Amino acid sequence: MNEKQEEFLEQYLSTLSQAERDSIPQFLAEYFCGDEYNANECARLIDNRIKRASCSLKVVYELENEPLPEVGRITVVLNWNQEPVCIVRLTEVSICPFSKVTREFAESEGEGDGSYEWWREAHIGFFTMHAKEIGKTFNESSELVLERFQKVFPQ
């Protein structure tokens, strides 16, 4: 995290008790999506409490030897320019094949027109491209890491 991101995080942490601070398993600062328009749009949707979930390919964690996200993780949501927009707390993590993602989960991602159909089409395209970039193949049985979160700062 850069200095501005750390200052933003500290503003939130100062509202918590020491026990609450000590219970946070991970801290992260990141933008969502891989291009400027979508990163800024996702930050806006999260800040407005429209986007309350996200997903990623499980194989990426395996290839990078990274642990899966932990419930309670705090993320400073950034825009494309790496500026903090808001903070979310991870409330749920699960693994699910792409074909089993529920309509409710897809709609909680809040992107596009908000429909399951839009989510499915957009994610097939994104995951197919992303898998190819890392030398993998995406299909309906590819496992996703599903994350649910809630905005905690600013209120």
Image (tube, rainbow, N blue to C red):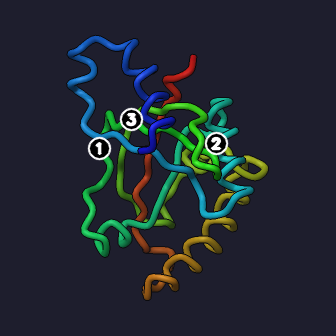
Mark sitting on residue 74: 3
Q: Residue at x 44, y 82 (%)?
A: 134
Which residue, given by chain and number where applicable, does mark 2 sit on?
43
Quadrant in which the C terminus appears: top right
Report helix, strand or loop for mark 1: loop
Question: Left or right: 70 with respect to 101?
Answer: left
Marks 1 and 3 sit apart, C-alpha to C-alpha, by 9 Å
Q: Residue at x 22, y 26 (%)?
A: 23
Residue furthest to the front in view is 3
Q: How far across and down, in percent of the image, does residue 71 sit?
A: 31, 38
Mark sitting on residue 70: 1
Mark sitting on residue 89: none
Mark 3 neighbour class, 10 Å CA radius: few under 14, some 14 to 19, many 20 or more: many
Could you tell me if the residues under marks 2 and 3 are in contact, i.e. CB atoms within 8 Å?
no
Q: Residue at x 21, y 24 (%)?
A: 22
Q: Is residue 74 above or below residue 135?
A: above
Residue furthest to the right in view is 113
N-terminal of the pair, mark 1 or mark 2, is 2
| Amino acid of disc 3 | Ile
The one nearer the camera, 109 or 89, is 89
Mark 1 or mark 3, whichever is nearer to me: 3
Could you tell me if the residues under marks 1 and 2 are in contact, i.e. CB atoms within 8 Å?
no
Report helix, strand or loop for mark 3: strand
